[in-house]
Amino acid sequence: MNPAASAQPDGLGEYLEVAAQFRLGDLVTESPHPGTRELSRLAGGDPAAALEALKAVDLAALDALHLYTPELVDLAGAIGETLASGGRLFLCGCGATGRLSIALEVFSRQGLLGSPLASGAVAGFMAGGDCAMVRSIESFEDYPEFGARQLQELGFRDGDLLVATTEGGETPFVIGAAEAAAEASPSNSPYFLYCNPDEVLARVAERSLRVLDNPDILKINLSVGPMALTGSTRMQASTALMAAVGWAIDCRNTPAADALAGRSERFRNWVADTDFSPLAAFVEEESAAYQDGGTVLYEAAAYGLTALTDTTERSPTFSLTPFENRRRGGDPPSLCYLSVPGAPDARHAWRDLLGREPRTLEWGGHSALTGIETLLGFDFSSSAPARDADPDKVLHFTISDLRDGVRLRLGALAHDIPAAGAGLFARHLMLKLWLNMHSTLVMGRLGRYEGNLMTYVSPTNNKLIDRAIRYVRILMERRGGGAPSYRETAAELFRQRGELRPDEPIVLKTVRALEATRRATPLSNAP
């Protein structure tokens, strides 16, 4: 055995053999935004200024999205023709795009997007089924065959239409679902929506060519620039995708460019005219509650899905303890939780959120992650406030609908987001922006990122390992002296991963180790 190879950290060799397939740093959605390099400092010292920076990024993304509205005309027409002919609309994604797919199904049935659609006319699904709304199931996201299988089990057939969304454009599950839809419904080509330029995507993520080069899959590129927090596609990219698909559904009976552009322009102007500064006090209040050992209970009825989406997406983004499962027992408590007012038990809470019975996957060895018993362990009923927390340490964050606005109340704080004349779908989109800003800045005050780089990346799969390596190299570059080589950084990351304690930031831990080595022995600046 080669002594040098045997000295490598476990797993490093296997990763380096496939690393070229996961080096996604050139993707726009993975690039640091130049306008938010000081985001962590602003979050900690001047949250009002941080909110202005985040608003600027959102507005730039909405301006970019507006230019794509003519490309949504055919999508809106295809949706209208499919539903009018008795076909069904299927929406799919992974992580944030999976949650928006399920939300759009619910909104369609509730009449938030044009006239209410009949139960079963629209089906939204995500990698891992409804359970993944709470905890992303990465073992599903990485396999195209799982996307195909979930689509087939929902009864997708010829004449149905799939709209597949993926911020990066390279998610295997979504690619697999789109390919399966093209085969199963040759009379109605699926749509594939994504947020990276074709030329970059084709060069960086070869698997995306399976879609880009497939004439039976219709593509809509919605590149809206880098994310405000590097790689956090739950922010601007998922907003653009949700808006685009939502507006297309809303305009299905009048698929004209001016109708789509009008919705885009009205929403963009609403955001531009909105004062986000009152949110600074909410950011300070919630972060102080966590620093004092408390917890926050989000209570939402009409906006339950939007609140659920933001609160659950904090866990993978910032490596927080995910929502505890009440049936499993032994799960540590999460920083925050969700309650659906008026729901007497977990099953009723899920019905209230989804407007239907939950759809879970009882797939043999996977059911412990994806089955109904696991789903019902996430208890968002009215009994959720009890949990196991000290009642004096529970801060309540309520979100309620008003005739002319959306009311936010956190402890003694209250603010009404003006929304006169705005439809419920637009209100959900606006609330998404508020909650994304809020949670991002709360996490900044808790030290969960440096500058605009996530330092608590959880390197549990190859894509996230590459992301952590990139962030280490960027921080080393910013701190002076140049970045170590990719291989050298990977080796140190794998060493530190093997010694990582709970709630340690793998990126900063690796940076500190490399800095210590650099002080002793200058490192190579090779790429």
Image: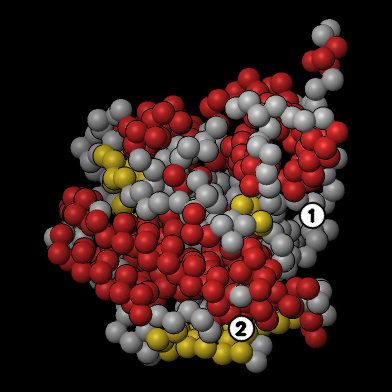
The residue sitting at 42% across, 40% down in the picture is 169
Percent of width and height locating residue 385: 71, 79
CA gap, disc 2 to disc 1? 26 Å
Number of numbered tags placed on the structure image: 2
Quadrant that contains the C terminus: top right
Residue 21 placement, left or right of 385 = left
Question: Looking at the picture, how far across and down is residue 241, in whole percent?
Answer: 37, 55
Judge whether 307 appears above or below 246 on screen.
Answer: below
Residue at left offset 75%, top offset 43% = 511
Q: Earlier in the sequence, mark 2 or mark 1?
A: 2
Q: Is residue 411 above or below residue 128?
A: below
Question: Which quadrant of the figure has residue 116?
Answer: bottom left
Amino acid identity at mark 1: Asp
- Quarter of the image where the N terminus is located: top right
In-front residue for pair 100/121: 100
x and y, in percent, of residue 177 in the image: 41, 38
Q: Would you say residue 16 is visible in this rendering?
A: yes
Residue 238, quarter of the rendered image: bottom left
Q: Which residue is mark 1?
A: 503
Question: On screen, 309 above or below 27?
Answer: below
Q: Nearer the viewer, residue 478 or 48?
A: 478
Q: In the depicted view, which residue is nearer to us: 213 or 29? A: 29
Residue at left offset 39%, top offset 43%: 196
- According to the picture, the residue beneath numbered tag 2 turns out to be 281
